[in-house]
């Protein structure tokens, strides 16, 4: 009841402020500047307090920007139809096939069999399997896939409420999905959003391999740190054995093998686009390959007669909201850039223009990690990246040196359920308390600040 009251109050105040800025800005020489401020402020406020589902808020530019003259219809359609939306769409459909045929379960089971059945090894197995899956499919989808398996393991643990292992196993799904998503361009929505903003606004192109050369090392280091932290916190529990934590080994089915072969081919084409193009003379794009793989799934026959690996009815389970959220973030960034808002916001950083790179990264990464604890990481990236990119043009540092760390840091929110979708998914199990997540996450947030800064200084 209290939460609904807060949302209604915020919505009322937000609309009053929105209309007030529109009214006062109408007589200004820079009317579109103030209109952009009004729309952006309303969106950020609604995202921050989740007055509406974040995907609904992301549609505000569709009905506000053209009538108010802050975006042309061509700019708006370019934002919601950006090529990276199709990269994600193809990736989502590929992950849908993996989930439909239980490929993720086979991978998780194989890793658990490999690492063993002690509590410490089970944690390692879940972190590895969740992180590995999240590198190639949405971190949200990965968390949804892995949570039921974690809960199945916990059902075999007596007095799970008193067990540190129970807490850390659930957190390994949340954190593994977020950290694994840093590794690749398609692993987490903010990654693609940043790439889209930089290409649209600054002509900077980031391909799959470019991102992976920086994101993969950071992801592996963070996975190792999370595991070592959990291992240390387990104490005497770490050596306890859990019998029969996985089901009887099942053979790989024909459908699973076909999906894995296709998925592997897509990953190879993503990872080695430049060498393949140079060798064959055939140029292609990451999003083109993703969509091609998705289309092929509707052609490839299933093991049963007159079936396909995917049928259109399966797509009802796609996270369409993420695609809308991406478009809304792109539209917001373009609106702020075209109407001079970003240029004005960079004044905030004027005092740091002569600061060293390590000082700048310390400030930016800390803001990104702790800022995304209270607002969507997509919202943070869509607002923060354009501002910092414009600031970078006024310094001796490149845009990537400042924007890559921010985006990677946005996936390192470990404290609160609202920090990232994987956190929210795991918290929805009802097996975790906010205090447990916050206590563990705060320490990992601080460690993540240091690691993101260090990796960025070395690799970006």
Image (cartoon, grey):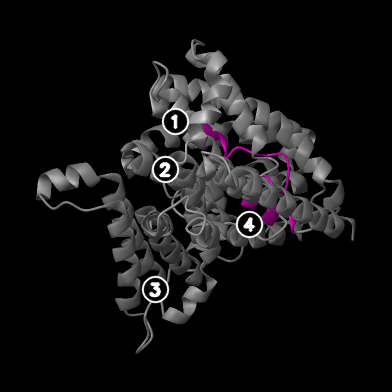
Which of the two discs, 2 and 3, labels the residue nearer the N terminus?
2
Closest to the observer: 65 or 402?
65
Cβ–Cβ under 8 Å for marks 2 and 4: no
Residue 282 numbered tag: none
Q: Label 3: how many residues lie within 10 Å, few (<14), some (14-19) or many (20+)?
A: many
Q: What residue is shown with label 2?
A: 197
Identity of the residue furthest to the front in this view: 27
Cβ–Cβ under 8 Å for marks 2 and 3: no
Residue 414 image-quadrant placement? top right
Q: Quadrant of the C terminus?
A: top left
Q: Label 2: how many residues lie within 10 Å, few (<14), some (14-19) or many (20+)?
A: many
Q: What residue is shown with label 4?
A: 54
Which of the two discs, 3 and 1, labels the residue nearer the N terminus?
3
Q: Label 4: how many residues lie within 10 Å, few (<14), some (14-19) or many (20+)?
A: many
Which stretch did the figure color magenta?
A: 406-428
Which of the two discs, 4 and 1, labels the residue nearer the N terminus?
4
Q: What residue is shown with label 3?
A: 255
Q: Spatial distance from mark 2 to mark 3, Cα to Cα?
A: 38 Å
């Amino acid at each position: 009841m209290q939460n609904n009251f807060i949302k209604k109050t915020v919505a009322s105040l937000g609309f009053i402020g929105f209309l007030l800025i529109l009214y006062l800005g109408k007589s200004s020489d820079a009317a579109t500047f103030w209109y952009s401020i009004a729309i952006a402020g309303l969106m950020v406020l609604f995202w921050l307090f989740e007055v509406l589902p974040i995907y609904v808020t992301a549609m505000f530019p569709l009905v506000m920007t053209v009538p108010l003259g802050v975006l042309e219809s061509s700019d708006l359609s370019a934002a919601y139809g950006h090529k990276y939306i199709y990269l994600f769409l193809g990736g989502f459909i590929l992950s849908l096939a993996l989930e439909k045929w239980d490929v993720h379960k086979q991978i998780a089971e194989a890793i658990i069999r490999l690492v063993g059945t002690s509590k410490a090894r089970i944690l390692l197995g879940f972190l590895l399997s969740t992180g590995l899956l999240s590198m190639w499919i949405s971190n949200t989808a990965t968390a949804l896939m892995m949570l039921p398996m974690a809960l199945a393991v916990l059902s075999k643990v007596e007095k799970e409420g008193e067990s540190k292992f129970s807490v850390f196993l659930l957190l390994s799904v949340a954190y593994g999905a977020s950290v694994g998503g840093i590794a690749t361009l398609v692993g987490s929505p903010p990654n693609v959003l940043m790439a889209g903003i930089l290409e649209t606004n600054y002509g900077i192109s980031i391909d799959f391999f470019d991102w992976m050369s920086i994101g993969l090392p950071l992801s592996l280091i963070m996975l190792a740190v999370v595991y070592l932290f959990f291992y240390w916190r387990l104490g005497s529990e770490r050596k306890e054995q859990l019998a029969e934590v996985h089901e009887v080994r099942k053979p790989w089915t024909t459908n699973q093998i076909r999906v894995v072969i296709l998925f592997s081919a897509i990953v190879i084409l993503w990872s080695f686009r430049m060498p393949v193009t140079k060798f064959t003379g055939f140029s292609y794009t990451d999003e083109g390959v993703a969509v091609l793989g998705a289309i092929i799934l509707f052609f490839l026959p299933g093991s049963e007669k007159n079936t396909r690996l995917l049928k259109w009815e399966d797509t009802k389970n796609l996270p369409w909201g993420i695609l809308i959220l991406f478009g809304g973030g792109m539209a917001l960034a373009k609106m702020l850039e075209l109407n001079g808002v970003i240029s004005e916001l960079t004044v905030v950083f004027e005092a740091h223009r002569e600061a060293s790179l390590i000082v700048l990264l310390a400030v930016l990464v800390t803001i990104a990690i702790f800022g995304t604890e209270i607002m969507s990481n997509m919202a943070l990236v869509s607002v923060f990246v354009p501002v910092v990119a414009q600031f970078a043009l006024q310094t001796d540092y490149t845009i990537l040196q400042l924007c890559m760390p921010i985006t990677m840091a946005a996936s390192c929110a470990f404290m609160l359920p609202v920090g990232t979708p994987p956190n929210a998914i795991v918290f929805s199990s009802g097996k975790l308390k906010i205090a447990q997540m916050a206590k563990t996450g705060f320490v990992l947030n601080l460690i993540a600040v240091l690691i993101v800064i260090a990796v960025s200084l070395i690799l970006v």
